[in-house]
Image (cartoon, rainbow, N blue to C red):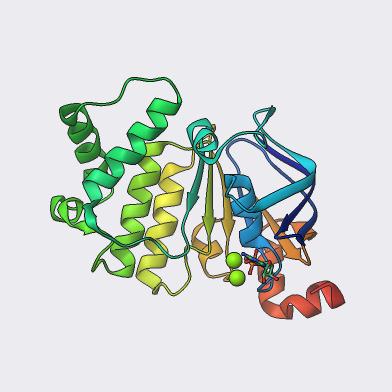
Amino acid sequence: MLEIKDLYANINGKDILKGVTLNIPAGEVHALMGPNGAGKSTTSYTLAGREGYNVTSGSVTLDNEDILPLSPEERAAKGIFLAFQYPLEIPGVSTLNFLKTALNAQRQTRGEPELDAVQFLKLVRETAKKLNVTEEMLKRPLNVGFSGGEKKRNEILQMALLKPKLAILDETDSGLDIDALKLVAEGVNALRAPDRSFLVITHYQRLLDFIVPDRVHIFANGRIVRSGDKTLAHQLEAEGYEGLIGKAA
Ligand code: ADP
Ligand code: MG
Ligand code: MG
């Protein structure tokens, strides 16, 4: 599914990614952990194709297709989804309208016809019901006044509608209470599928008690320095980054 090979990238000429290599097979959930400033978010933005993140060498393929020449919109249409650490609050735009725009942008880039209002409402209502997103939440302005849990529910709804091949959750668990954390985990677990992969970036082993990852990678100084199974997260909790990877942290 996703293959990153020896990826180097900079921001404003400052080298941040220094040889990232990572393979996520279809259907797997991989966790990425590591100290602040290691380059985890830079990795997710580079995968999403955000402006200002310059790849200088290495490769990234999704289902064997080189995605580096593609725009952020084209990558999203190919199935890359990035959930935000701090969800945007957009006062003038209802959640419903936001979701419709996101979904139709994806369809348009894919050359598929846009959904009309009736088709869209049917789809979103069915999906929202399954995820316990209320009609009232859908009508409110995007994320404005939403609780942490409601924002997460909304993000999971967005993911469920866009049906990504690769979903990247970048510290989407930061600042969440245990109930909201479980909600994120339930959402991810419900959306696990043989043709969908997840990259879950987190500081906390806690989340990985609920989303059991197939692999855990430790990121330090711009690359992955250690990989293992789910027990690596427990080891990290016990030993800390320095204990586990020494001066590389
Ligand atoms: P992490 O997500 O692992 O905490 P980041 O990817 O956010 O780390 O940051 C990695 C490094 O890149 C840090 O040293 C950070 O200061 C730097 N960095 C991030 N964004 C920018 C930017 N827009 N301009 C310059 N440096 C940046
Ligand atoms: Mg950080
Ligand atoms: Mg980060």
Q: Is residue 66 left or right of residue 141?
A: right
**On-image quarter of the N terminus:** top right
- Of 131 and 61, nearer the camera is 61
- Viewer-side residue, 44 vs 233: 44
Q: Position of residue 81 (x, y in %)?
A: 49, 44
Which residue is rendered at x = 84% and y = 72% of the image? 248
Q: Residue at 82%, 72% (x, y): give it.
A: 245
Give the quadrant of ligand 2: bottom right
Residue at x 54%, y 32% (from the top left corner): 195
Residue 63, position as x, y percentages in the image? 64, 29
Left or right side of 181 for 117: left
Foreground pick, 205 / 104: 104
Picture layout, residue 207 above or below residue 123: below
Q: Quadrant of residue 243?
A: bottom right
Q: Is residue 165 left or right of residue 240?
A: left
Q: Where does the image place residue 210, in percent across and percent down from the top left?
A: 49, 61
The relative height of residue 24 versus residue 207 in the rendered view (above or below) is above
- Kindly indicate the quadrant of the structure image that contains residue 200: bottom right
- Residue drawn at x 60%, y 53% is 44
**The C terminus: image quadrant:** bottom right
